[in-house]
Structure formats: structure tokens, C-alpha cells
Image (cartoon, rainbow, N blue to C red):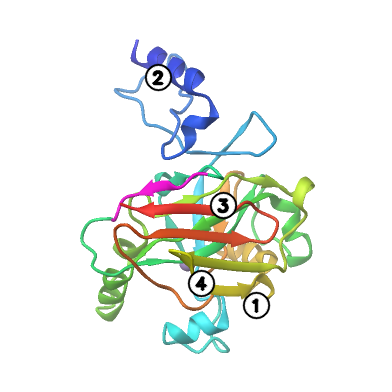
Amino acid sequence: MQRRSLFETTATLGLGALAGCALPGHAAKDAKTPFDVPATYVPIVGSDMVFPVRRIYCIGRNYAAHAREMGSDPTREPPFFFQKPTDAIQNVAPGTVADHAYPPLTRNYHYEVELVAALSTGGRNIPMASALDHVYAYALGLDMTRRDLQRAMGDEKKPWEIGKSFDKSAPIGPLHRVGRTGHFTQGSIWLKVNGQTKQNANLNQMIWSVAEQISKLSEAFELMPGDIIYSGTPENVGPVVRGDVIDCHIDGLPNLSVKIV
Ligand code: MN
């Protein structure tokens, strides 16, 4: 009864309902579970299918000027990665300004605009030369960060998960398949708050390219279909407060906008 009503809700609402929520998963009809847990999907532009998200990987300090503003030396650091929980996804439809709730516990809530790569195949120890073959699609995303908590935990040599891996910390636009857009190795990436430019860089300024990120990640984890990778943010991250409107852009993708509420 409950599962049927969830399914009907999904079918009735269609893709438009993806903004701001996750769709119910497809548990087997006779699965013996005491309750349903929703799965996370991202819409695919030009398709009636949706992309099932398995894991969200994020690379840290992947633009030299941003690494410097975070207090590290970009020339000597190997790439490092962290994860967000899958249900951190907040789907944002192009042409809308989605409400994004200011999260609890922080007094320094930061934006980070990022290119996101979505994988349809995976593997271990993937060579760089074939790494991009695993990318199915790209999207524009925000790696929202409770900077005060991230810094405080880092200072104490504790995991800074609470600063990065919280509810709704990963707003994302719809996925654009590689066949329609090609790969994103260069192009403008920018972010504005209330119309004022805050971040403004070029994708070719990444320290580790998307291909290198896939290759490096696959040394540490077996990558799988459904994995998505937030590829890092340029310099000039900064805070937002309630009422602010964030508008972000990558050449070749529709803009992504959220309002902090
Ligand atoms: Mn980031």
C-alpha cells in the first residue's frame, strides 16, 4: 500500500518533481524491508530516464589560487578526495531559483561552484588515457560548505565531514550527456551572489583534470556506474546569508540558481 502510493506519486509528478527532492527507489516488489528508503536520482536532459546516484566524490583544492587561499601549497600536494552522502543531492531545475535552506550549526556558510562528472562505467586503476570514456554526462553543481565547522574540525585533526557532508549540501543541475556536449576541459566557470561576481575562472585551470581525477580515484576506490565527481572549485569562495541569491555558470551548461532561505 505504502509502496504503491509512493510509486504513483512518482509517476504522477514526473521529472518536474525532482527539484528539491529524491524519488523513491525501486525496491523489489516482494523485498522484505520494514520501510522504504528513497534512492537519489538526477534528471538527464533530453531523456525520460534519470541518473541513479551511487556515490558522490569531491576533490579538494583543485585550482591553484583556491589551494593558496585555503592555506596550502598547490605545487606539492597530491589530490585528495572526500565524499558526501548520496542524499545530499538537491536537484535544481534550470530557469528556476530553488530555495536552499541555510543549514544548522554554522555561522559561515560558503558556496563553491564546480563542474560535476557522472560515470556510467567504472573500474579499478583506470588509465588516464581512457578515463574520460567512463564519463556519461556533466552537470553544474555547488559544493556547499559549513566553513567554520570544516576549519574547526581540521584544526583539531578530526574528520571535517560535518563541514562538508551534510543534508542538501550538493545542489546540482540536470545532467548533460557527453554525446551532446563533449567533454569539459576548458571554458568559463563563474558564480555570482546577488548579481555580483564572486568566483570567475576557467576549467583549464584545474590542477588535476577530470581524467586525472578518475584515474587517481580508481586507485583508492573501485569506481562504479552511478558515481559522480565534484571536480573542485576556483578561488574566491565566500559566505552567503539568508536572502542571498547564488547564480552560477559553466560555458555550455544552463545556469544554476538557488536562494538561501
Ligand atoms: Mn569543493
In front of the other: label 4 or label 3? 4
How far apart marks 1 and 2 lie (CA) works out to 44 Å
SS class of the residue under badge 4? strand
Q: Which residue is mark 1?
A: 205
Q: Is mark 3 within 8 Å of ligand 1?
A: no
Image position, residue 58 (x, y; %): 50, 62
Would you place residue 19 above or below residue 243 in this image? above
Mark seen at residue 51: none
Residue 81 visible at all: no
Q: What are the residue bounds of the magenta stretch?
A: 96-102
In front of the other: label 1 or label 3? 1
Q: Is residue 243 left or right of residue 47?
A: left
Q: Which residue is mark 2?
A: 6
Image position, residue 120 (x, y; %): 66, 44
- Quarter of the image for residue 240 reads bottom left
Q: Which residue is mark 4?
A: 197
Q: Amino acid at mark 4?
A: Thr
Q: Amino acid at mark 3?
A: Ile
- Judged from this view, the residue extending furthest toward the front is 195
